Image (cartoon, helix red, strand yellow):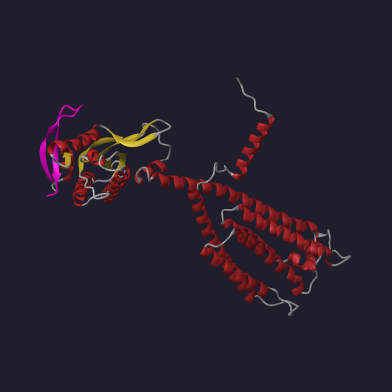
Amino acid sequence: MIEHLSPTVHRSQMWTSCMSFIFGEPVSGRLPARVRDRIARQQLQSEKLISWVQMLLVVLFASLWAVAPKTATNPDFNLVPFALGFYFLFTLARLIAAYRGTLTRPFLMASVVIDVGLLMLLIWSFHIQYMQPASFYLKAPTLMYVFIFIALRALRFDPGYIVLAGASAALGWITLMLYVVHAEAGNPMITRNYVEYMTSNAILIGAEVDKIVSILMVTCVLAIAVLRAQRSLYRAIIDSTAAQDLTRFVSKEVAERITQADRAIQPGDGESKVATIVFTDIEGFSTASEKMSPAELARTINDYFQAAGEVIARHGGVVLLFEGDAMLITFNAVTPQDDHAARALDCALELEQVCRERTFGDGVRLLTRCGVNTGAIVVGAVGTAERLTFTVHGDNVNIAARLEQLNKQYGTYVMCTEETAAACGDGYDCAFQGEIPVKGRSQPVKVYSVARP
């Protein structure tokens, strides 16, 4: 059955598609507060940059005015030094406010209007300064600075200020043009002859309209470009924030692997690698936790994980799984490490040492057992298209888990396989404990307890 859309819905969809094509795909939903805070900080940095550029413009204008020959025919009237002085003080105040973080939207809007208004006032003063008809100032090249002020607003990712600058400039130029037309009663100084326009003080309405159209077109193009950039910026900040949040739930290395992948990771994507796996578990934690309140339990386990995480990070390990009080730690699975076996044993031994030397939470002592194994594993994503887990799997992972449990039988705290001991060399005191059968393997696995020499 074919569903037919009503004309109203069809027009609405076409309008939405057209707006997205022109202005870019809008950001759906409400921006979270932390995202808005990051955007606000970036906009504040933009305002600092704008203030410095304005200060540079003041210095440039003042330098050009200082070195230019003074040809004004009315020595008693010169608005330029006063305008530059006012603009310098205003820009300085704006710069200070930007660094103090006290810039408000009304102040910024007033700043845009003052920038353009001051320029228009300066242009208007030229006909008095040079004792010419009012139409004289319409040919002043100083109008070109209008485009600098409009473009300056593009340094901030907010098209509203660009539109305000362009609209102020267009309105200001229309006002100046109307002033010329009505300045001398009965003599509007209007011509349709282009040569006369270029060689006299006569005005050509079409030429002034061209200037206004140019101002408005530049404004529109810049506003659209900044709006598209703004939407891209918002999406980039949202993605960046999400990636940062992701590192709180998975390791930084895994988060980078997910977010920097050339294509979206799919179920079953993985690669075979030789790596070292460490399984850890707290000795007797179930019994100890029965004597704690939920708040005490949370403080204790979080304190333990904080201390363990510092040790793991110091040796370059990556925690792929927290399960109760147990951890699955990998070396060379996510981050390349040639000495992964030695790193893993060092990590396990330091974890044992830290747990022996300190307490956690409200003075609770927790001893940790570790199983370490080196061998071929598969690193990748498992799950469904809607929900994935990035993990490692294979019988060598299972052996590491088996060794952790075997510590209880042998009264040890760190056990490893023959493969791990051989990969580490002679820097460790590895004591042979026996052989254990492993499901799926024809030969038993030789296991060792590990201590520092």
- Identity of the residue drawn at 76% across and 71% down: 127
Can you name the residue that lies furthest to the right here?
186
Q: How many marks?
A: 0
Left or right: 272 with respect to 163? left
Instruction: Determine the residue positioned at 65% across, 60% down.
Output: 147
Q: Does the stretch in magenta take in 61? A: no
Provide residue 113's location: percent of width, then percent of height: 66, 62
Q: Is residue 29 above or below residue 435?
A: below
Given residues 191 and 164, the one toward you in this image is: 164
From the viewer's side, name the closer residue of 67 and 388: 388
Q: Is residue 190 visible?
A: yes
From the top left corner, tell me how far across and down residue 157 is, in percent: 56, 53
> Can you say which quadrant of the picture contains the N terminus?
top right
Q: Vertical placement of 12 versus 102: above or below?
A: above
The quarter of the displayed image where residue 263 is located: top left
Task: Name the spot of residue 415 as percent of width and height, x first.
Answer: 17, 40
> Quadrant of residue 51 in the image?
bottom right
User: Residue at the spot x=59%, y=49% of the render?
Assistant: 227
On screen, residue 442 versus residue 263, left or right, reads left
Q: Is residue 180 above or below residue 243?
A: below
Q: Is residue 424 left or right of residue 75?
A: left
What segment carries the magenta color?
Answer: 429-453
